[in-house]
Image (cartoon, rainbow, N blue to C red):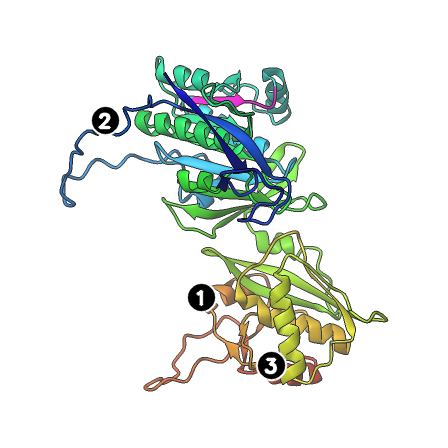
Amino acid sequence: MAKSSKSYNCQSCGAVTSKWSGKCESCNEWNTITEEVVESSIPKGLGAKRKGNALNLVPLKGEKQEKKPRHVTGLSEFDRVTGGGLVNGSALLIGGDPGIGKSTLLLQVVCRLALNGKKCVYVSGEEAVDQVRMRAERLGLADAPLELASATSVRDIVTSMENGDSPDLLVIDSIQTMYVDTVESAPGTVTQVRTSAQELIRVAKRRGICILFVGHVTKDGQIAGPRVLEHLVDAVLYFEGDRGHQFRILRTVKNRFGPTDEIGVFEMAQEGLVEVANPSELFLSQRQEHVAGSAVLAGMEGTRPVLVEVQALVAPSALGNPRRAVIGWDSNRLAMVLAVLEAKCGVSLSDCDIFLNIAGGIRISEPAADLAVAAALISSQTGKPVQGNTVFFGEVGLSGEIRTVSQPDLRMKEAAKLGFDQAVIPAPPKRKNNKGKNAKAPLAIQQIDHLDDLNDLFATHIRAVS
């Protein structure tokens, strides 16, 4: 006979406590701990006597199995993020804000694979079958041989996968709506989400099915449910973007079968999500030249160089505590750059309101953006615009030094392709036996090793260097 036990789980971080409290001691969130009842499948008194089966140990060097090809979707941006396509028996988790386009993207992916002869199943726990059909008709994919179902019971889904021919691809939209009937908790709770994902992944790996989960996100942008959910899957993708912009960014933060920190860029249109082959040109399409407070960053997102516009506004403040507003960048890093400019370069910004924006709705996290941010701040503070054909990249240290960053050649090559002819970059480090022989750069280079040099460049309006 199964035994029931009670536990108190935090719905925000998944921590388990022995009693209820108003505040979770792990994540410091209030009113997130709920009582859940868990059924134990081991009868009392048998757990200590039961023995496990011996493992079948094999040597590290064995016979190589035939490599199975990936499921290539035909959406080049999606295939780039997943590492070249979907792998048999893999589990992917896709999270994003409500209404950002997660279901639309996955419907396009599975319909393309279904048209290529793959057996695909789309299980929706949030929408009826007719609603999914309406979306497919709007996207022009109504003729795809895709099998649909509207269900929330994990037991029913597992039975359907194990009976008959297993599908090549299974979409669960979303994992927060699924439930296991042996767990006495509401769908969406920590126990239900964890147990449902474990059951589905176990069957998918045994049958060689590629499974894609849609995950809700919290107000902080993290995927809702226990953090162990991200450890169970093979890849975690975030679909992000500002609803005020038509751009959507698919970013990978974990991938066991490909590179991480890769991004795919889409544009939301009437016919669905359209791939953007050249995101740099799209991000800079509305940029105005000869405007103070604007600088172009030559950044890297995974293996792809991306050029984005960094906008800064420095305005006098009548407040005792001036405002600092940041969109698309780390606010702590902005505070560091402001402190270095004031302490090491003599640029007074402590009595000013600072507003910083990465145009286009993309979020930049690499340190190479420090130099472009500093250039935009100095440009706004002095009122002198940056010459329109100049790009920046480099990391700023606490003493004001400019540190080198990775893959400068790819950054400058992308900038030259878009018509830029000058780059302000970090000076190379001085090493022994360094003869200083570099390949010919595709554009004129201005090397600086301290933020003071950037101030000097603005004194001459950053003119081209031959």
Q: Residue at x 47, y 74 (%)?
A: 404
Kind of residue sitting beneath label 1: Gln
Q: Main secondary structure of the magenta part?
A: strand
The residue at which mark 2 appears reads as 50
Q: Residue at x 60, y 37 (%)?
A: 273
Q: Can you say whether 3 is above or below 21 in the image?
A: above
Q: Is residue 187 left or right of residue 385?
A: left
Query: In the rendered image, which residue does mark 1 sit on?
Result: 407
Name the image quarter holding the C terminus: bottom right
- The answer to whether the residues at label 1 and label 2 have Cβ atoms under 8 Å apart is no
Identified at 65% across, 85% down, the residue is: 456
Q: Tell me the kind of residue under disc 2.
A: Arg
Q: Residue at 53% across / 25% down in the picture?
A: 185
Residue 48 pos. (x, y %): 26, 30
Residue 452 position, x and y percent, is 62, 85
**Mark 3–mark 2 contact, CB under 8 Å?**
no
Q: From the image, tell me which residue sits under label 3.
A: 451
Residue 153: x %, y % from top left: 49, 18
In the image, which is nearer the foreground, mark 3 or mark 2?
Answer: 2
Secondary structure beneath label 3: helix
Task: Say left or right for 34 vs 39.
Answer: right
- Residue 123 belongs to magenta span: yes
Query: Considering depth in this image, is 189 or 287 the residue closer to the camera?
Result: 189
**What amino acid is found at the position of numbered circle 3 in the picture?**
Leu
- Region in magenta: 120-127
Disc 1 versus disc 2: nearer the observer: 2
Q: Secondary structure at mark 1?
A: loop
Taking depth in this image into account, of 34 and 317 the one nearest to the observer is: 34
Q: Earlier in the sequence, mark 3 or mark 2?
A: 2
